[in-house]
Amino acid sequence: MMDATTIPVSPSFFATIAAALRIDATNVEHSMDSRSELDSHANMIVVGSNCFVLSDTGRTASVNPYNPEYAAKSIPIVDAALLYEDQVTGQEYILVIRNALHVPSMTHNLIPPFILREKGIQVNDTPKIHLADPSSDDHAIKFDEHLRIPMKLHGTFSYFVTRKPTVEQLNDADPNHVYMMTPEEFDPHKSSYAQTEDHLVNYDGEVADARNRSKLLISDIEDDPTMTVCAMSTMRLEEQTLVDESVLEEDDADEGLLGQPFNVDLASISSILCERTLSHRLSTRREVSSMMTSLGSTHAHEDDTDFLFEDMNSELDFEEMLSGDDLFTKIAAMADRKQVDLDEVMASATYAKPSKGVQAAHLAKIWKLDLPTAERTLQATTQKRRHTDNPKMARNYGTNDRMLRYKRINQYFFMDTFFAAKNGGRSTRGNTCCQLFVTDKGYVYVVPMRSKKDVLSAVKQFAKEVGAPDAIICDAAGEQTSKELREFMHSIGTTLRVLEQGTPWSNRAELYVGLIKAAVRRDMRTSNCPLVLWDYCLERRATINNLTAKNLFQLHGKVPEETITGQAGDISNVAQFDYYEWCYAMDNEAGFPSNKEVLGRCLGPATGEGNKMCQWVLKPNGKVVSRRTVRPLTSGELHSDMELKKRDAFDKLIEARFGNTLGRQRKNVPLPEEEEEDEWATYQDDDEFSKPIPDNEDYVDIHGRLINQQPVYDLLLNAEIKMHTDGERISIGKVKQRVTTPEGKQMGTYDPNPALNTIMYEVEFDDGTVRDYGATTIAENLLTQVDDDGYSNTMFKA
């Protein structure tokens, strides 16, 4: 009797090998030696052209190359066999590999050591040259006491020589000399490997004592539901062989196709050739499909061919397989007797692709972005709803926007107030200023206000819409540090942190005030929108900022909104219309025979009005209304003479009422009372002179990004230093400006900490010479001029 430990291959798998030998009986290619290399970076075995393919599983794997710029490739998954010949005894061994990637263009094979160890094979991959006292088991693969494969080196890669076995060698192989190299089941993405490894090490990095190791329960390991459903719903080829063998042992007295005689030779090749096994497998497939439907599985059949079962060979003549009795006529008869449900068998599941929304080119146009940024934004966001382009408005759009609602989370925020110019700065809603909230990752929330006295109301709205942050950081302005504001923030559990006076660069909101202003100016200028509608443009631009995938390290490929909500940002309500774009909106109040489609201008998402898809629409009478049923103009309407006249009349009415982008004031429109704003007074006393802060903004490019990643109020500019210039001579100099390249780019990177600042500066000395010094050199020089108490030191030459 044969020892079970020396037969690594199960009997069921020999049926698979036999089927492959019959299918590939004409394959008499001469094999050549090839390398089977150990590859620790692979998570699946990869076989090349010098292997014998036992069976094609019908499945494929999406393989990503080392460079992410290259597209992923679909590689077939096969069961294969390799031939290894012992160089000493000349004995040949068959090495069987399950679920390997097949790349015929390769001449060698790649074998991950992890998979071999999972099978229980001893892999010693340390070369003998790296061992002080090597033995025969070193740098070798040991299956058992009968087979040990010594490895060689190809450069720095460990390998052993194999070749493709012939059909005769597979037929004549001794079962004692057939070894399985892969485990029966293996999931390279299983999290239990890493968890088990972590449980074996203590907090010092040492191997934990067996008595003190924490226990890892199977129930604590999270399974991938997709992998679980696929494993449950996909019947492997060897499992089908076992099913066929069990069917062949049943009694032949059954009715219908189960009572037909069986053919062992045909069944071993493919169950489609034996009517009895075909009937049983159809019934089994129906049961599997029913189970998949009950689980909600969307796992479709892996094979892209037109065959029903994965073991049907596309190279066989289908007409020959149907010679004699019509096989599918009998299957139809089984369906009539309700033994087989063809709908469930033919379509085991369905797969819904993600809906396609706005294109990157259109998004780049209406958001004023470059194309790569728009493409990254579409990858990092969703668009679950969209406005239709259908010019017919037979009825209102649906009000369902549940998929767009989200919950906010707490973060640290910076806060600041900025004002619109008094000349034309009061909006149609009476707003003259805005409260801006921003995180260190660029999430912006804006609240337009009538005056700076409404800061408390703005903070309350922010806390309701976004959440109560852990802390709000602001400058020492009176309206931002009032007693009422402190009491409210204390009641919601938020800390108010006030910055030191005279340190505006510490408030990140100052930076984003400049960015938002520049973006709003650009939108107003390109759209020729009246200046009094600036607050609508401001709210839309803040929304776009939060949904833009900026190339910032702290975002890690996400959009700012996802850092707050924890969910992918959705661009459904800002991906259709440009600012101040022509549109038609549904007006339900229009009576017969007036047209319900009213021409207007889209001003962006309607915050706090209707559902998430509502848009602010400017009507010809100057009123701004929220409408969810809005569509853009068609190409025919854009070029129609009648529509051009309507749009021209619309613009004249709006200009007469609100003015234009040049800031002309509205006529005959009452304005709210003008409130005087307190002027900013810089601090000064008897010991300290007034230090005015220049009211200029950071320079940005056409996309709103900072040209220089630091504020214009650089700490080292205009600083006076004493440097050794000519030998021992001490010269007094003044830092004039930053050093730039011929292309206009600054040299180095700015950092508020002088020790980390790598920017080069031009220093002008009292003799008129100009020299370049680094920020660290200037900072060290400044520190040497004062003592620990801040008093200046005078250096004299001895």
Image (cartoon, rainbow, N blue to C red):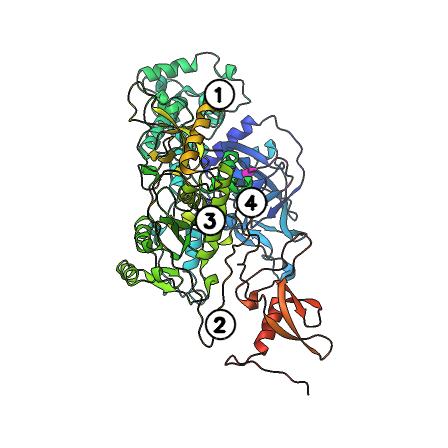
* Residue at mark 1 to residue at mark 3: CA–CA distance: 36 Å
* Residue at mark 3 to residue at mark 4: CA–CA distance: 13 Å
* Residue at mark 1 to residue at mark 2: CA–CA distance: 66 Å
Binning the other alpha carbons within 10 Å of mark 1 as few (below 14), some (14 to 19) or many (20 upward) gives few
* Residue at mark 4 to residue at mark 1: CA–CA distance: 33 Å
- Tell me where the magenta segment starts and ends, as one range: 100-108
* Residue at mark 2 to residue at mark 3: CA–CA distance: 33 Å
Which numbered mark, 4 or 2, is in the foreground of this view? 2
Which numbered mark, 4 or 1, is in the foreground of this view? 1
User: Where is mark 2, residue-wise?
Assistant: 689
SS assignment at label 1: loop
Classify residue 288 by image quadrant: top left
User: Counting residues from the N terminus, which is met first, the one under dot 4 or under dot 1?
Assistant: 1
Q: Residue at x 57, y 46 (%)?
A: 111
Q: Residue at x 58, y 74 (%)?
A: 782
Q: Position of residue 606 (x, y in %)?
A: 35, 39
User: Where is mark 3, residue-wise?
Assistant: 516
Q: Position of residue 674 (x, y in %)?
A: 35, 50
